[in-house]
Amino acid sequence: MTLKGNWNYPTKVWSGPGRIAELSAACAAIGITRPLLVTDAGLAGLPMVAETLALLKTNAVYAGVRGNPTAAHVEDGLKVYRDGGHDGVVAFGGGSALDVGKAIAFMAGQTRPMWDFEDIGDWWTRADPKGIAPVIAVPTTAGTGSEVGRASVITNEETHEKKIIFHPKMLPEIVIADPELSVGLPAHITAATGMDAFVHCFEAYCAPGFHPLADGIALNGMVLIKDALPRAVADGTDIDARAKMLAAASMGATAFQKGLGAVHSIAHPLSAHYDTHHGLANAVLLPYLVAFNAPDIADKMKPLARLLDLPGGDVDAVLAWILDFRKTLAIPHTLGEIGIPDDKADIVGRDAFRDPSTGGNPRTITEADMVRIFRAARTGDLAGAAG
């Protein structure tokens, strides 16, 4: 194993209850004088959005973002941004709003189409860095960790593929992680987004390569989630649990600079083809990929089992705990239970195999494996997923 690696870690995070009150100071700190608030349609009418606009002393808002954002969301928001003469973005909401907000800021001064900046090779160098506007990220869910990411995941509606748009300067300059903004999140969304954070930590930890910084952050993120997520689901007003989940979400996204795996590879086409909630898809799929990857992650499970305080120290113990943990959160066991049919199994397998996350899977995986695992996850066949 080589000990060589290139490591980057995230940005300024202002964490704690009530920190949203410092939003105007954050804008001033990075030179934003005409901010555009980018949020999702589900939040647009809530008091916290009106209160946030009041803090910014503006009515400038783009609230056209919906789950699993598309290029159209970015293009519509970009028009609002340019027409309003804005000089920065406040991305406010869940992962979709953060991704679109970052993409709008990134594209603000570009002349090439967005797909020219897909995370392939050095395509990011095509961008004019002077045309990238600053971003402040304000997460209201604890899942994607997009607030500390240098990319946006956007669906190409023509090809039904999720694409990763990447540039180092897409990283928000300041994150305001205020747990009070997440207290109204429904229990089922809290569970799904929280499991998304767990999967980020788990897949990053299991990804091959020497990256002890990412491994350490991923391990501690999973420990935080074990304690905090059930509490946040049971009592949405538990500020301690909400704060720890926000931290764990950022930790997951920080850790997955190391890589992800086939859980994400399959979840991405499910969102693109069926508009499945990304965190929920990850939560359902996780045990099936643990079963598949078991031969190649056995050594990794020993320290994880110790930290999670499990009675056994092997893959079976971790898998059993994951299954029980999902039950406590009311996460369905199969893709069939969340309405995913079998009509596009071959297409899902093809798109999953092509997904950039596939390269980080700890066990070599084929397109046929992807199809088989997808079908196993539809019906609850863990043994079939293992192969």
Image (cartoon, helix red, strand yellow):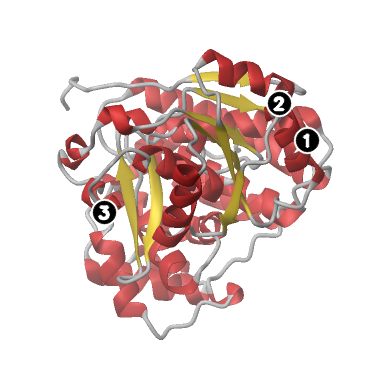
Q: Is residue 342 above or below residue 259?
A: below
Residue lying at 23% horizontally and 68% vertically, measured from the top left: 367
- State which mark lies toward you, 3 or 1: 1
Q: In which quarter of the image is the N terminus?
A: top left
Q: Provide residue 361's location: percent of width, then percent of height.
A: 29, 48
Q: Is mark 3 on a helix, strand or loop?
A: helix
Amino acid on which the number 3 mark rests in the picture: Trp
Name the residue tied to disc 3: 115
Badge 1: few (under 14), some or many (20 or more) residues near its Cα, within 10 Å?
few
Amino acid on which the number 2 mark rests in the picture: Ile
Q: What element carries label 2?
A: helix
Instruction: Identify the image quadrant of residue 353.
Output: bottom left
Name the residue tied to disc 2: 20
The residue nearer to you, when weighing 32 against 210, is 32
Q: Provide residue 221's location: percent of width, then percent of height.
A: 54, 30
The residue nearer to you, when weighing 142 against 73, is 73
Name the residue tied to disc 1: 51
Q: In this view, does 175 lie above or below 143?
A: above
